[in-house]
């Protein structure tokens, strides 16, 4: 009944508008659209204008196309509860996105247009698959334009794609557009981090299993998974998501696909690494982090939840983790970790710290400390993880930041805490300036060695060396592994000589 009513209004409105301006006289289109939008009761009029614009898209000049998206946003803002208006607006934006005019794509990535698409999808996506199909078509074309990709990432278009695929998993068109959007955007670090979440992987695997025989959809998602395998993975987690079985099935159905063979090799490698990690894992319960966990902490993934998940011991519930560190005696924790992170802003650092705290870990954000006295009070609470940035060890001598950093290591060592420091760099920056990154790592090692380690008594140095990895520093990036391993050996050597 609804479709029949919509068709009647479509025919009548489009007929009226054709009388106002035939295809040969399309110039008054913008003024007519404005007139309908100003009248809040003319929902079908606004819808009809959008449909007219869709019908005459080939007749519109580039200048008119660039202005059309403005009217589309106004229409959906005024009549967002109308399925008809939303359908018309989305149809216009979808058709605009399919053109080769790059400037149009940039305009479509503006916040207002993206918000309009999102509004239409939230309001009517569950009940009107055709609307979702058109939204996903627009996202597919927009995400494939280099100038627009950053806007799509910021707007969370990859999250829309996963949501649409999950909501309409049997709709081939929606799934195809969603898979293409993920492939276009997955190389961004924040998108890759989101796709590596369990709920995201479950959606991808579910779609692949249902559309495994569709070569384009399955192949597109497999290419995305293959690229994500550059992120160190826990093989047990891959098994939990059903990825190995999914890859094997894909390889059987599409034997000529090279990406299937590559994925099978990656998964086999992850299985071997997992076996090695489990064989070498430290069984002491007081360890917060293993070396494998630290090496998995690739800081280019900026989402706090993803980073925090890598800091937690495997197969340990938060309550168990809390009891692991809470002792009836008044002794400080035996183990602490200092993380030197790239600076992505105070808000990001605070969010990262808060995320760790929700996991029942005692966390100290060094950047929020104002003076050494305040730091000593915070250290009395016995934090297991200290979070700071690269700027901290690079501070000039006698500055407030330098004194706070020196106080941190001195006081923690006085408490008898086993401290391990880890510095991470955004891998893109490392690739651009490897020499500068090496210098940063080496300077931190030198600072810790000369300022803190040498100030300890001979007995204390010997005790620290006996603990093995007291000042162990491992990079997230393989470029600097030899630098840090050499530093660790020097620590152990000096302690034994003492």
Image: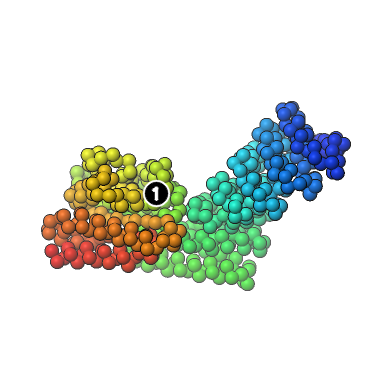
Mark 1 sits on what residue? 343
Please name whichever residue, 329 or 69, is drawn nearer the observer in this view of the structure: 69
Q: Is residue 224 left or right of residue 373?
A: right
SS assignment at label 1 = loop
Please tell me which residue is depicted at 69% across the width and 32% down the height of the picture.
Answer: 79
Relative height, residue 428 to residue 75 (above, below):
below
Whether residue 235 is visible here, answered yes or no, is: yes
Measured as percent of width and height from the top left, residue 428 is found at: 45, 58
Please name whichever residue, 157 or 169, is drawn nearer the observer in this view of the structure: 157
Q: Is residue 334 left or right of residue 19?
A: left
Measured as percent of width and height from the top left, residue 160 is found at: 59, 47
Q: Residue furthest right?
A: 19
Please tell me which residue is depicted at 54% across the width and 69% down the height of the picture.
Answer: 262
Q: How many marks?
A: 1
Measured as percent of width and height from the top left, residue 271 is found at: 44, 66
Relative height, residue 35 to residue 309 (above, below):
above
Relative height, residue 458 to residue 119 (above, below):
below
Please say which color scheme the image uses.
rainbow
Please tell me which residue is depicted at 75% across the width and 37% down the height of the picture.
Answer: 30
Please tell me which residue is depicted at 15% across the width and 61% down the height of the picture.
Answer: 462
Quadrant occupied by the C terminus: bottom left
Q: Residue furthest bottom?
A: 256
Q: Is residue 28 left or right of residue 172?
A: right
Quadrant occupied by the N terminus: top right
Whether residue 167 is visible here, answered yes or no, is: no
Q: How many residues crowd mark 1 within 10 Å: few (<14), some (14–19), many (20+)?
A: some
Measured as percent of width and height from the top left, residue 237 is found at: 46, 58
Quarter of the figure with residue 5: top right
């Amino acid at each position: 009944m609804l479709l029949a009513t919509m068709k009647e209004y479509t025919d009548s409105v489009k007929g009226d508008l054709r009388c106002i301006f035939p295809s040969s006289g399309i110039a008054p289109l913008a003024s007519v659209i404005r007139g309908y939008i100003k009248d809040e009761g003319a929902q079908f009029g606004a819808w009809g204008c959008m449909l007219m614009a869709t019908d005459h898209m080939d007749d519109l000049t580039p200048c008119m196309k660039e202005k059309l998206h403005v009217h589309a946003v106004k229409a959906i803002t005024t009549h967002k509860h109308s399925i008809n208006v939303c359908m018309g607006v989305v149809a216009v934006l979808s058709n605009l996105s399919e053109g080769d005019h790059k400037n149009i794509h940039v305009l479509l990535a503006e916040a207002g247009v993206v918000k309009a698409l999102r509004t239409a999808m939230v309001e009517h996506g569950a009940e009107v698959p055709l609307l979702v199909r058109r939204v996903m078509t627009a996202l597919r074309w927009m995400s494939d334009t280099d100038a627009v990709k950053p806007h799509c990432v910021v707007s969370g278009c990859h999250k829309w794609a996963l949501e649409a695929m999950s909501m309409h998993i049997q709709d081939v068109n929606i799934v195809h557009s969603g898979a293409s959007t993920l492939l276009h955007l997955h190389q961004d670090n924040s998108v890759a981090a989101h796709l590596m979440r369990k709920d995201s992987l479950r959606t991808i695997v579910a779609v692949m299993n249902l559309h495994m025989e569709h070569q384009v959809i399955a192949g597109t998602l497999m290419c995305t998974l293959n690229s994500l395998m550059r992120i160190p993975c826990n093989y047990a987690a891959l098994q939990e998501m059903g990825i190995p079985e999914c890859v094997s099935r894909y390889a059987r159905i599409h034997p000529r696909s090279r990406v299937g063979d590559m994925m099978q090799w990656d998964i086999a490698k992850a299985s071997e690494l997992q076996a090695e990690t489990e064989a070498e894992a430290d069984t002491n319960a007081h360890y917060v982090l293993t070396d494998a966990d630290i090496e998995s902490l690739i800081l280019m993934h900026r989402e706090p939840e993803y980073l925090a998940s890598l800091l937690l011991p495997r197969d340990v519930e938060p309550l168990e983790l809390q009891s692991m560190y809470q002792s009836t005696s008044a002794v400080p924790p035996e183990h602490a970790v200092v993380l030197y992170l790239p600076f992505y802003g105070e808000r990001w650092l605070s969010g990262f710290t808060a995320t760790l705290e929700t996991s029942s870990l005692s966390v100290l954000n060094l950047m929020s400390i104002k003076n050494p006295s305040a730091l000593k009070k915070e250290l009395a609470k016995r934090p297991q993880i200290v979070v700071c940035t690269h700027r901290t060890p690079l501070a000039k001598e006698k500055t407030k930041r330098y004194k706070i950093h020196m106080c941190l290591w001195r006081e923690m060592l006085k408490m008898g805490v086993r401290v391990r420091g880890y510095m991470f760099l955004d891998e893109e920056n490392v690739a651009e300036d490897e020499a500068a990154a090496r210098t940063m790592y080496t300077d931190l090692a030198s600072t810790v060695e000369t300022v803190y380690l040498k100030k300890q008594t001979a007995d204390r140095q010997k005790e620290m060396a006996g603990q093995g990895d007291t000042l162990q520093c491992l990079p997230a990036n393989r470029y600097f592994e030899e630098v840090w391993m050499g530093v660790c050996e020097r620590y152990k050597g000096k302690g034994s000589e003492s």
